[in-house]
Structure formats: structure tokens, C-alpha cells
Image (cartoon, grey):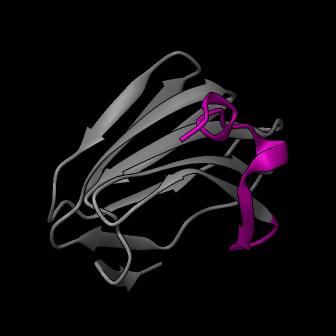
């Protein structure tokens, strides 16, 4: 594989939308590993869910994120990250006035592994 095929950016990655005007760009998309850059506008939230097999790591690039892990609420600022083990009920929200941008790294891929629990 040529080196230019290894370089990833929003401009050259598969894009999708989710939720209420949220964006995702696949930086790496394989059955063993996904790395997605995501953008959440102010006032948006992901549905509460968990993964049976995938472990995840969220790394905040800009903005402030609110994570709900089971019954605990955690606020993280840019530069911070959080590890989510399999079977951990979680949700990410943007309760602030600026966009939230983060990387979510999942191993293995979460395709077909997401169980929604409400919210």
C-alpha cells in the first residue's frame, strides 16, 4: 500500500450523519478496529447503549463532553479521554454552546454489537 493511502483526514474519509445533525468520519474501518472522528453540535446526545464485545476509548479534541456511565455523570474537557469497557452502559452528550469534536476508538468494530437501553 502506498503511503498516501495511509493518510487520513475528514476530506478523504467516509462520512456519515447520526442523531440530530451529528457527523462521523471513518479514519480506520475494519472488523478488528474502528477509529472515527465525530462532531456533535450543541445540545445533542447519543442514545444510551452498551456493547457486548467492543471496548472503546473516547479522546476529546475540542469542546466539553458529558458522559453518563450507568448512573454516574462525568464531564471531560478537550485533551482528556475515557475508556469504556464492554457491557458498560454509556451515553455522550454535548450540553455546551460549542461543537464537541472527539475520536472514538473501538476494538473490535461496534458493527452489530450495539444494544440500546433507552434515552
Q: Position of residue 114 (x, y in %)?
A: 33, 78
Q: Position of residue 94 (x, y in %)?
A: 65, 47
Q: Position of residue 62 (x, y in %)?
A: 69, 25
Q: Quadrant of residue 49?
A: bottom left
115 left or right, relative to 86:
right
96 left or right, relative to 78:
right
**Residue in the foreground of this view, choosing between 68 and 28:** 28
Furthest-top residue in view?
79
Q: Is residue 7 above or below residue 71?
A: above
On whether residue 19 falls in the magenta region, the answer is yes
What residue sits 70% from the left and 39% below the top?
A: 100
89 left or right, relative to 21:
left
Number of marks: 0
What residue sits 23% from the left and 61% below the top?
A: 54
113 left or right, relative to 25:
left
Q: Which residues are magenta?
A: 1-21
**Residue in the foreground of this view, choosing between 55 and 89:** 55
Q: Position of residue 109 (x, y in %)?
A: 34, 64
What residue sits 53% from the left and 41% below the top?
A: 1
**Residue in the foreground of this view, choosing between 6 and 60:** 6
On whether residue 10 falls in the magenta region, the answer is yes
What residue sits 48% from the left and 27% below the top?
A: 76
Amino acid at each position: 500500500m502506498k503511503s498516501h493511502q495511509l493518510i487520513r483526514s475528514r476530506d478523504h474519509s467516509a462520512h456519515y450523519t447520526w442523531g440530530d445533525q451529528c457527523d462521523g468520519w471513518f479514519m480506520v474501518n475494519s472488523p478488528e478496529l474502528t477509529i472515527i472522528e465525530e462532531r456533535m453540535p450543541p445540545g445533542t446526545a447519543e442514545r444510551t447503549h452498551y456493547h457486548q464485545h467492543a471496548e472503546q476509548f473516547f479522546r476529546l479534541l475540542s469542546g466539553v463532553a458529558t458522559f453518563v456511565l450507568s448512573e454516574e455523570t462525568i464531564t471531560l474537557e478537550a485533551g482528556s479521554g475515557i475508556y469504556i469497557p464492554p457491557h458498560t452502559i454509556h451515553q455522550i452528550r454535548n450540553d455546551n454552546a460549542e461543537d464537541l469534536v472527539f475520536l472514538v476508538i473501538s476494538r473490535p468494530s461496534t458493527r452489530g454489537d450495539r444494544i440500546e437501553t433507552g434515552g
